[in-house]
Amino acid sequence: MLNRKLLPMDNGAGRHTQMEKAVGLTKYFVSLPRARVLAASMLVVAIVFGIALAALAPDNLFEAGLTSFYVLAVPGFISIIMGKALMMKVPIRRITAVALIGEVIYALTYLAAISLPVFGIPLGLEIVFLGSAFVLLLWYIIGRIVFVLKWRSLIFAFLQLLFYAFFLITNGLLPFEGSTESVLIKFYAASLILLGALFLFFWIINAPMKRTFGVASTDAVSMFFGQWFYDARDMEKAFRKVGEDVQTYLSVFLFRKKGKEIAFVVPYIHFGPFGELGGSNFSYLIAKALGGDGKQVFVFHGLATHDINPVSVTELKKVTDKCREVIEGAEYRDAKVALVEGKEGECRAECLRIGDAAFIGLTRAPETCEDFSLGMGIALTSEAEKRVRVAALADEHNSETGEIQYVEPGTPFGFRYMEAVGKACGAKVKEGKLRVGAAEGEISVETIGPAGIKVAVFDTEPKYVIILADANGVIPAFRERIMREIEGMFAERKWGKVLPAIYTTDTHKVNTVRGVVNPLKEDERIMGKIRELVAAAYEDIGDAQFYGERTLVGIKALGAKQAIGIVSTVSAIVAVARIAAPLIIFGGIITVLWVISKI
């Protein structure tokens, strides 16, 4: 999570911030330079090493340069070529980046081996054996977990060690004693000891997760990177193991016009966790499954958070099948409509009262707008349905400030939302004939998912303009600019008063970037597309009939118990790892030094 301030919350919000922290590790992801830049950096490391070598050893600069290229650059580039041959799916620049880090470690240990004896410290060669072992671990860990290569990572780690050790031994830079074979045995003995220590550490951190959820911690991390980098779906198998069957609300509001049908679908399901996993792309997939043939489908962010992440994209069919049941059984009627805004403090409920139904958008903008828990969603829906027959409540999710404040039962603003909803649904207002227009369009920007932007304009007083972007939030400044532009557009064209409302789907499809969220921000392409669609939707306004229904849908989701269990298990693993890791590393180093002295 990029530059986000985590605020303490009550009633379970801590588990959500912990889960966001997990994905928030992606803030440490960096965009690597091109492979040629990384390769040039390897040459620079070799040159710097040669200069340092010339200063420490009696060689002239030219001889030192040749030596540095022979013991560092040559095995480094051979490692890159062999690495690409063994790890075809891994981009060459990632392999080169790891090779560069390895080369730096080798260079530092070689310099230490040359300079330490000058100060009377007799550990020069032992440092080289230890350094080479740590490089082997580096290649194995990154290959195993980040590159998602279980056995080839181990094979290659041993191969690159052979390249560096062979060129170092045959060059004679360091005074190794014994035959080439005996020195190679020391290199591999040191590496095997530290590798054994690493396997012991993995066993310790894997055991709790494996015992509780049937998935090893290292496998879970590897699957995370597999999805992030390669769109792999192995993590969904793990989700299925730990998921639980849940029931949640699904509201479908239908508007039938001449030659067109408009559907508002509000599943109380969270569109996460990220990328293509689980329900991350449901806002698009639901609309795609139900749309076409003159149907425009708006899929809103219902009142649910990560507990209700579908475990797999296959859960989509359960949602769309239930939607089709509602659509096929719809009994359209003429209806009156009114726009009512309920306010309590910073919490607002923008309510479209349509006959005996209510479509309600919830927001605290410009204060931060984060997810509602399902429990809070059920409570708010019940509050609305004390006054109307059926209600669909959508989280507008339209103010990304960098803070995380989930709406949970017991939170002060949770009660303020209850008051706002009650005021919006209970107010006496003047109603008018239901008239609505809609338009939709795709746009190719990284902050908007494949469902694009959809606009609906209701002929209320003032007119209510819903701008639904397939995005994960919007920064307050851009939201305010959109609202000003639409207000100015209506005034300029003499269309009357307007209340623009910016909604986002909270799709996590767009989260495959550095950080947890990727909100809408200033972009002229987005602003231009919104203006175009608002104009099209306004021109599309016409008389409509209405039908609304709320039902239950059963899916397999992560579930509240499992979410808490995962966070608790991870916390326990971290606590154990903080103690075990330094002890295992220290023990491994002592063992290496002892074994090397005996060979």
Image: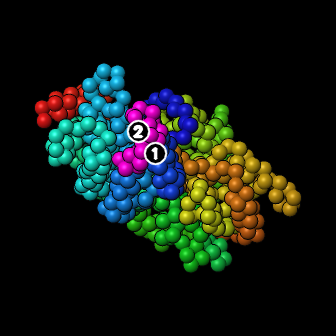
SS label for mark 2: loop
Taking the magenta stretch, the answer to whether it contains residue 60 is: yes
Number of callouts in the render?
Answer: 2
Mark 1 residue crowding within 10 angstroms, few (<14) / some (14–19) / many (20+): few
Picture quarter with the C terminus: top left
Residue 124 drawn at (x, y percent): 29, 30
Query: In front: 106, or 500?
Result: 106
> Can I make out residue 306 in this image?
no
Residue named by callout 2 = 59
Query: In front: 417, or 55?
Result: 55
What residue is at 51 percent from the left and 57 percent from the top? Answer: 36
Q: Which amino acid does label 1 sit on?
A: Phe
In this picture, residue 26 sits left or right of residue 339 = left
Residue 107 drawn at (x, y percent): 39, 40
Residue segment shown in magenta: 50-71
Taking the magenta stretch, the answer to whether it contains residue 500 is: no
Residue named by callout 1 = 62
Q: Quadrant of residue 459?
A: bottom right
Dominant SS of magenta comes to helix
Query: In front: 472, or 439?
Result: 472
When the figure is inspected, residue 529 is found, relative to residue 178, above or below; the finding is: below
Q: How far apart are marks 1 and 2 (CA)?
A: 8 Å
